[in-house]
Amino acid sequence: MTVPIEIGATDGDQPVTLDLEELLATRLLVQGNSGSGKSHLLRRLLEQSAPWVQQAIIDPEGDFTTLGDRFGHLVIDAAECGLAGLKRAAEGVRQHRVSVVLNLENLEVDHQLRHAAAFLDGLFGVERDAWSPMLVVVDEAQLFAPAIGGDVSDEARRTALAAMTDLMCRGRKRGLAGVVATQRLAKLAKNVAAEASNFLMGRTFLDIDMARAADLLGMERRQAEMFRDLGRGHFVALGPAISRRPVPVRIGAVETGSRGAGSKLAGPPPVASDAARAEILQAAAAPEAKPLPPPRRPSAPAPDIAAQLAAARPAAVHDRAPPPTPEQAAARQAVLGEKLRQMLAEPEAAFRPPAVLYQDFLVRLRIARLAGAPDLPAFRRLLALARAGVEEAALAHDPDWPEVGAQAAALPEDTQGVYLLLARAALEGGPCPSDAAIARAYGSRSEGRARRLVEWLEGQGALVCRADGQGRRIVALTGSGRQTAPGDPAAA
């Protein structure tokens, strides 16, 4: 059954509809700078689809709590709930098919990430009998799926990113349709953004965001400037649920409003009253309260210094564990490589974020009772080598390998695997990898992104590309001049 809902109109007042059934299967990404009308668009979508589908809104600012008054959404204040309680509540929401708003406004950012992840895990982990269709809207998605680390703890960021990745990558089979909205595409994790097939792009000013928006909409780079000129509430739409070609849309009116004060101007009184002046000046001149001294505690007995020194003395040299032999270190490295290859051999593993793969890797090492797991930076290097299919020991004898390793270390972490893949082919004289192989080494399915990444590496001076007479690609390493054999970029 097709359920069209009207989200707005074109400049010629032709209605623009969104196929709700198709949206549930293909997901939606909304982008727009602050003040572009992004929240208004989400509110329009939620209001129009409320009679047709169950909804869950992850609301970091409390903007959507008014949906409860008009449409009966259950509003959960996350500040009053524990993580386990939120997970149970999410399971109940799906079992009873109740639309819900998760209000996170009274939490610090670190706790917002943890509570949102717990709630999403509850939606995701419910029994199969409760897998009915649900629209899951995440406002300010760059908070919960950041492209890079911020001021929050690594644990909270990894937990939230894993939950968002599950929602967008694996949620469809469980009836969960992700709708993510972000102020900046550059701040949103690529694995989350890449899973959306429908786009509504609003006003944005930074070149990198305009370029990514134009790229997602299939527009030429010279057309990206148009995103600076979009008015408030005006978006460019594309996707199987909306239109097969980019279409401008002016978002329609809404029935509910935000609890925020808005941005309307309100001038101060011409002259402050005497009472207001006196109150402000009195507050400024009030003496600082002196903290009370801590209560006195009964004096403890004098510490036994000799006993403390004896306890802190390091163990004798002969009691310490001896360093591993070269054979033991090589055997341990072989086990690490084997566990990593087993993990990457699973379906979809190549496209999961490194932080999620790292947690999976640690579990596998615990199962194998292998102590001394690598830290996350060391794991990223192992992952880059594994995605590139590089056996470091096999290439260590090559005189140009140290230069390749130094060049890879100077590149951003997410590009090192691609460079090593191309470098390995050059050192071995094999054919140049195809766009599909390069995309997989980057953790993506987009062959266009693979081509742009090769161009970027060439711009960084790491390699040089050329084509032979048949249009096949050849990549040469700068410095050594080692190059690949010709390879078909379009090969599988």
Image (spheres, grey):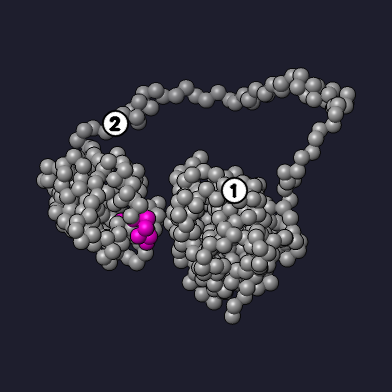
Residue 154, visible in the rendered structure: no
Residue highlighted by disc 2: 314
Residue at point 71%, 22% (across, down): 289
What stretch of residues is rendered in magenta? 441-450
The amino acid type, in three-letter code, at marker 1 is Asp
Disc on res. 423: none
Residue 31 vertical position relative to residue 307 in the rendered view, above or below = below
* Residue furthest right in the image: 274
In percent of width and height, residue 295 lies at 64, 26
- Residue 446 in magenta stretch: yes
The amino acid type, in three-letter code, at marker 2 is Pro
Residue 214, visible in the rendered structure: yes
| Quarter containing the N terminus | bottom right
Residue at point 26%, 43% (across, down): 462
The Cα–Cα distance between marks 2 and 1, rounded to whole angstroms, is: 68 Å
Disc on res. 229: 1
In percent of width and height, residue 168 lies at 49, 62
Residue 428 vertical position relative to residue 173 in the rendered view, above or below = above
Left or right of 323: which side holds 196? right
Closer to the chain start, of discs 2 and 1, is: 1
Q: Residues within 10 Å of mark 2 (few under 14, many from 20)?
A: few
| Quarter containing the C terminus | bottom left
Left or right of 102: which side holds 221? left
Callout 2 secondary element = loop
Q: Residues within 10 Å of mark 1 (few under 14, many from 20)?
A: few
